[in-house]
Amino acid sequence: MENYLIGAAEVFTVPGILAILIGSAAGILVGAMPGLGPSMGVALLIPVTYGLPAAMSLNMLVALYLAAEYGGSISAVLIGTPGTAAATATIMDGYPLNQKGQPGKALGASLVGSTFGGVVGGAALMLISEPVAVVALKFGPVQFCALGIFGLAIISSLSGDSPLKGLLMAAVGVALTIIGVDPISGGLRFTFGFYELYEGIPFLTALIGLFALTEVFSMIEEIGTGKKADSKAARGFLTLRESIRLIPTFLRGSAIGTIVGAVPGAGANIAAWIAYDQEKRWSGKGDQFGKGCIEGVAAPESANSSSVGGALIPLLTLGLPGSPTTAVLIGALIIHGLTPGPELFTKNPEVVYGLFVGLMVAYVAIFALGRMAMPLWVRVIDIPKGVLAAVVFGLGTVGAYTIRNLVFDVWLTVGFGIAGYFLKKFRFPMAPLVLGMVLGYMVESNYRRAMIMSQGSHSIFFEDPISLALLVLAAMSFFWPLIQQWRRQRAKRA
């Protein structure tokens, strides 16, 4: 308790609260801007924190990290473009809710879910840091490969009415991750002489094209059709009764986000997709997902926010980054003369426990700022389609350029946008493609490392209990939706 009082003394000062507010406001804006994201936001803010005390600096940076994970849902709901990679799952039901004239409900579910998930992740960070970090440390190539296969097994529940189309799109997504330098041999694969492809296709570049520019082309098509959203219905926020009804969803998403976030290298993106898939199974509303189901927003948003607390567990206890953003945070700690790991708790308790207290304060700030800004966000639907299409196209192309400062990425984004437009026209599901891109590299690289370790024997995947459990879950996740669909079709024929 004494350490928490020390931490509270660091946070509850005028400069301490102001630092958290600045970090939260900057994070919401960074998250809502396609192409930026929490990693870049934290990296850009580090120079501002040089002259600040270590505890205040870390709180400002972590507040930005937390807020950016929420901010990504704003553009996902309003313009069908994920502000962050983790917000991709939010689009699945968030944007359809917007199209149904309920962006306020979708943004409300995102804000409440993010706050709830963040508090759960923060509580887990305070209470179970050490045991969770010990389990996460046991993950090697075998376990990571099994985790990736478990993630890919979600494809069958994201494929809609056509599992074949879903599998085809997932295969395309995995194939796209093969482009670039071979992770084991170092050779070049499918670069076609373009040095810009040596690092592979940037994930955010593909996302901006597949979602932002695809939606731009769809908006252009709708100009002059008379379609207009009901701005009056858009003002409705999530009610208290709806929030209470969503508590089981928030709890499931938060638990998944915390656990997945604590696994170094897994990240908020995978956590959000797993939470979305599991909620589709457990909510009893599986047939409504993808059409504007509020649970489809609440689950991934609570998961990606709680994953922040999970990702900080290996960072603080073991000195291992649990996500790309925490890797940047390690640099910030080193700049301030701090070494992440067990000694941080004993040598600098004011930093660690100040962060614990600051996490909770940050989520209060994020909720307050998000709620106050809600009327501004929902006014986006009042913007004429032509103007909105031009703005989204501009933001998308600028965002694509800023990822690596290459014009090549802009053309790549336009190419993905054109492809996405036609895929949407022919009703190919986009989610399996994205999931294939998220997990393809993880599965391939760790599978090949595992084969090297076992000298080519696949038994290594069944000898490890963690790997075996994940593979069993993967089989259940893949086949159960297919069995359900077969039973429904059989009942229809009968």
Image: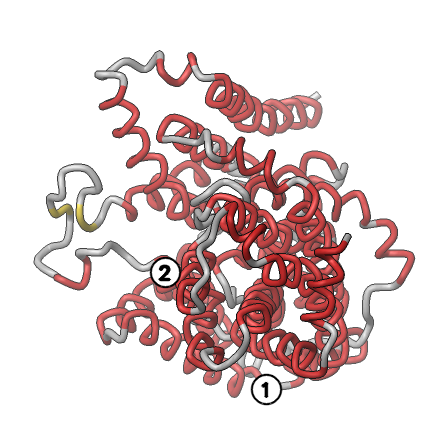
Mark 2 vs mark 1: give the one in front. Answer: 2
Q: Residue at x 62, y 44 (%)?
A: 258
Q: Residue furthest right?
A: 241
In this view, the residue in front, 356 or 27, is: 356
| Residue that badge 1 annotates | 384
Label whose residue precedes the other's in the sequence (2 or 1)? 2
**Res 408 → quadrant:** bottom left
Q: Mark 2 falls on what kind of element?
A: helix
Q: Position of residue 284 (x, y in %)?
A: 76, 37
Above or below, 370 relative to 186: below
Amino acid under disc 2: Ala
Q: Secondary structure at mark 1?
A: loop
**Residues at circles 2 and 1 in contact by the CB criterion of under 8 Å:** no
Residue 412 appears in the picture as rendered = yes
* Residue 110 seen in this snapshot: no
Residue beneath the point at 35% across and 30% down = 141
- Relative image position of residue 115 (x, y in whole percent): 72, 60
Query: How is the model colour-coded?
Result: secondary structure
Residue plotted at (44% across, 56% down):
339
Identify the residue at horizontal 81%, vertical 69% (top origin).
237
> How many C-alpha atoms fall within 10 Å of the one at disc 2: few (<14), some, or many (≥20)?
many
Residue 241 rendering spot, x and y as whole percentages = 91, 57
Q: Amino acid at mark 1?
A: Pro
Residue 57 versus residue 448: which sits nearer the camera?
A: 57
Say which quadrant the C terminus sits in.
top right
Residue 352, image x and y in percent?
60, 57
Q: Is residue 256 above or below residue 12?
A: above
Residue 313, which numbered label? none
Q: Which residue is mark 2?
A: 206
**Residue furthest left in the image:** 193
Q: Judge left or right: residue 370 versus residue 160.
A: right
Quarter residue 60 falls in: bottom right
